[in-house]
Image (cartoon, grey):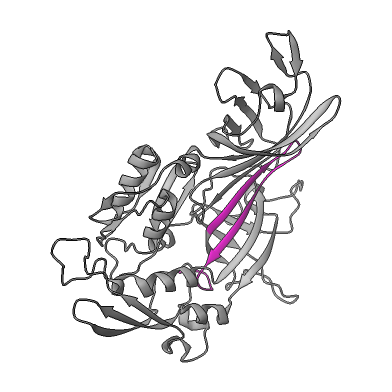
Amino acid sequence: MSTKPSKYQKLTLYNNSNTKSVDIRSGTVSIDYYESILSPSITAKIRVINTGNTMADDKNNEYSAIYNGLPLRGGELLEMDVLDFGNNKSGIKLDLTVSSVTQVLSEDDKESFLLNLTSGAAITNELNRVYKKYTGTIDNSVDNILTNILGVNRSKSNIESTQNKYTFLGNLKKPFRVLTWLASKAVPVGANSATAGFFFFETQDGHNFLSVDSLLKQSPIQKYVFTNVSESSETFEPTPDLPSLDFKILSYSVEKNQDLVKKLRFGAYSSDRYFFDPTNFQVTYKKFTSSDKTNLGGDDIADNLPDGIIDQPSRIFSQVLDKGTLEKNVSKDPNADPNEYAAQSVSRYNTLFTQSINILIPCNTNLRAGDVIECIFPKTSIDSTGTDEKISGKYLIKDLCHNFNPNTSITSLNLIRDTYGKYT
């Protein structure tokens, strides 16, 4: 964990026939590695500049540049191993696939290009479809699709158990689309108020299918403090909040701080739902009011809203109940009762993005999208010092980017949370 340059231990490109390889470490200008809880695959960008005499041609005993000498056409394998300078136990060690090559510039004595990379599962997703019928709990269906269609090793998947069952047909949809669709219907085991809403995403460790509740219940894995102390300061004295300048917030900005109109439009706090039953032609009504108590901040959701607004439905939903039309005998019970997930997932997803801030920190490859960290921000007041108790507290990492270049290594985070205040 440091802003110093990291070490490129391995950056090897293989051609599609696996007959040629090239080490691009010396020509790598920058690496950007990305994760997000909204992305089913990890991605990376590597900018390369090299001279023409790189790839040997055994037939003509000549040398050529990488772009045409390997050649680079998409689908090539890249073995990447980048070591975090400050901790020999951390780093990024992955096999990625070239999805495209852009910004190709060629001159007499050198060439440059940008490698756009993704995980192998993203390529497999484009080559396969979900076509069969699935029954049972949603987590079993997720495991089936990940293992049998995408070919993901179970040791590389983290799937949280769900309490609701759902029968469906794949309808020749792509796996990532089906898995993301199932995430909005899933209810975690032990959810007292049937709090629905999952995320399907990939990190360095593999694929994750985790509920919003379980993500919010995590303990912070690291604490970061915003301070004006210079990184080169020789008079820095460690404190319990800031034991090392490796855990300093270099800069931050507030991207979003509540969007009340948008949340009312989506029915984040309260909504009316009408369900049509095709077996008896009856319409039932249910009102939903958010009562989530699992929050990242110390305040309840209603604490920072105008009085009475959380009790007034701002959106009307209508839905036809699925009564098992795929079964030989039509059931009286709904297939994955929407009363148990529909309104809750809409509310949970929307309230989670109430606050959004961007921070820049020294490179820390131990962090993952979906982790919770604690941030401490000072009061912005001339007359007082101390911690800003409203903006400080726990945050969920939504997006993560590690940037490596010859001069520095930094990590950029987009953090979100649902309520204000420090959690107690």
Q: Main secondary structure of the magenta part?
A: strand
Q: Residue at x 48, y 72 (%)?
A: 351
Residue that lies at the very extreme toward the right in this rendered image: 108
Q: Residue at x 59, y 47 (%)?
A: 34
- Residue 90, image x and y in percent? 54, 37
Q: Quadrant of residue 320?
A: bottom left
Residue 210 in the magenta stretch? The answer is: no
> Where 404 sits versus 163, above or below?
above
**Position of residue 265 in the picture relative to residue 248 (left or right):** left
Query: 415 or 141, which lies in front?
Result: 141
Q: Residue at x 76, y 48 (%)?
A: 233
Residue that lies at the very extreme toward the bottom in this rendered image: 308
Is residue 155 at all visible to an observer of this figure? yes
> Where 129 sits versus 271, above or below?
above
Is residue 193 at all visible to an observer of this figure? no
- Residue 304, image x and y in percent? 53, 82
Q: Quadrant of residue 219?
A: bottom left
> Where 98 sits versus 71, above or below?
below
Identify the magenta region.
397-424
Quadrant for the C terminus in the image: bottom left
